[in-house]
Amino acid sequence: MKGFEGVFPILNTTFSSDGALDLESQQRLVDHLLQSGVHGLGLLANASEGYTLASEERTFILKLVGKQVAGRIPLVVSSGHSGTDVAVQLSREAEDLGASALMVLPPSYMKTDADGLMFYFDAISRAVGIPIMVQDAPLMTQVAMPPGLLARMARDIEHVRLVKVEAPPTAPKVTAVLADSDLVVFGGLNGQFLIEEVERGARGTMPGSDMAPLYVDIWKRLSMGDRTGAWQVFTRALPLIRFELQPGLGVAAMKQNLLAAGVIRSARVRHPTATLDACGLAELEFLRYWTGSDGEPATVSGKTRS
C-alpha cells in the first residue's frame, strides 16, 4: 500500500460547450493538479460525471491520463456498477489500462444484504490483482456498511485494502474502522472533516479538483504538525467547501472555479448533472474572492476581506 497517502482529488471530466470531451482542457487540468503537488488522482467517479460517460469515453480518458501521468502518482479508478458481472468487467478493463487501485461503490439500484455485498466485492477481487477501495457512501447509495462488515471484507477478500469513508459522522467511523481492521482509510465528502479524519488515522482525502492547492497546503501543515495553520487555511476555505456540498451542485461549482482560474475552457456539465443559476454563479464568485481565486492556497493573514 505504499504511495496511497495524501490528497487524491477526483478528476473532473472536461467537456466543450457542445458536450463533447475536451481533451486539451483535460490535459491542462491534469498538469494543474500535478503542479499543485497532489499525491494521486481519482478517475471516473461521481465528481468526474462518470455516470454520463460512454464506455469508449471511459477507455479514452484512462489511456490519456495514464500516459500523461506516466506512473508519477497512483490512479484510483471508479469501477462499481449496479450489476456484479459488469463491475467485474469494468474493473478488469481499468486494471488493464493502468489503474493503480479501484474505487468501488456497492450496488445500489437493486440492494443486497451483507452476504450479497461480500459476494460482489469478492467477485471483483478474484478478477483483478490490484487494491480495491470500498466506497462507503450511504448518502448516495442508501447502502449501509458498518465497520464490522468492512473489517470482514478486509479479512476475507484478498484485494480489499482501502475504504473511502463518506458515512456521516465520518470521523467516529474512521476510528471504528481502524479499531477493527488494517484498512487504509481515506476521507471524502469534499474534505469537510479532513482534519478530524487525519487526526483519527485517515491516510488520505479525495476532494474535488478545483481546490487541490488548498487541500495540499492543509495536508502539508498537518504533516508538519502545524495544526493551527491547517485550521486557518481550512477555515478560510470552508464557505466554498460548504457551497460545493449542496446536493447536485458540487460538480458545476468545481468546473466554474476551474474555468475562472483559467485551467479549463468550459464549465459545461452533462445532464442530469445540475447547473448553477445566475444567483448561484454570483454567490460562487464572491466565495472565490473570499477563499482566494488565483488557484493558490488562501492567504492566512487575519485580515477580513470586505
Image: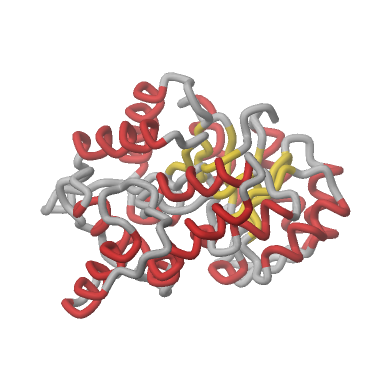
Q: Where is residue 78 in the image (x, y as percent from the top left)?
A: 51, 45
Location of residue 144 (image quadrant): bottom right
Name the residue furthest bottom.
279
Q: What x and y, as percent, mark residue 202?
A: 69, 49
Image position of 181 with respect to 292: above or below: above
Please state which of residues 76 and 209 is positioned toward the viewer in this rendering. Answer: 209
What residue sits 44% from the left and 56% below the top?
Answer: 46
Q: Is residue 229 left or right of residue 153?
A: left
Say above or below: 6 vs 148: above
Q: In this view, does 169 lie above or below 37?
A: below
The quarter in which the N terminus is drawn is top right
Residue 74 shown left or right of residue 33 in the figure: right
Q: Which of 148 and 253 is in front in this view?
A: 253
105 sits to left or right of 157: left
Residue 208 picture location, percent across and down: 42, 53
Residue 23 visible here: yes
211 on left or right of 305: right
User: Residue 169: image x %, image y %?
Assistant: 68, 71
Q: Identify the residue at image location x=48%, y=53%.
A: 207
Residue at 65% over, 66% down: 167
For the C terminus, the quadrant is bottom left
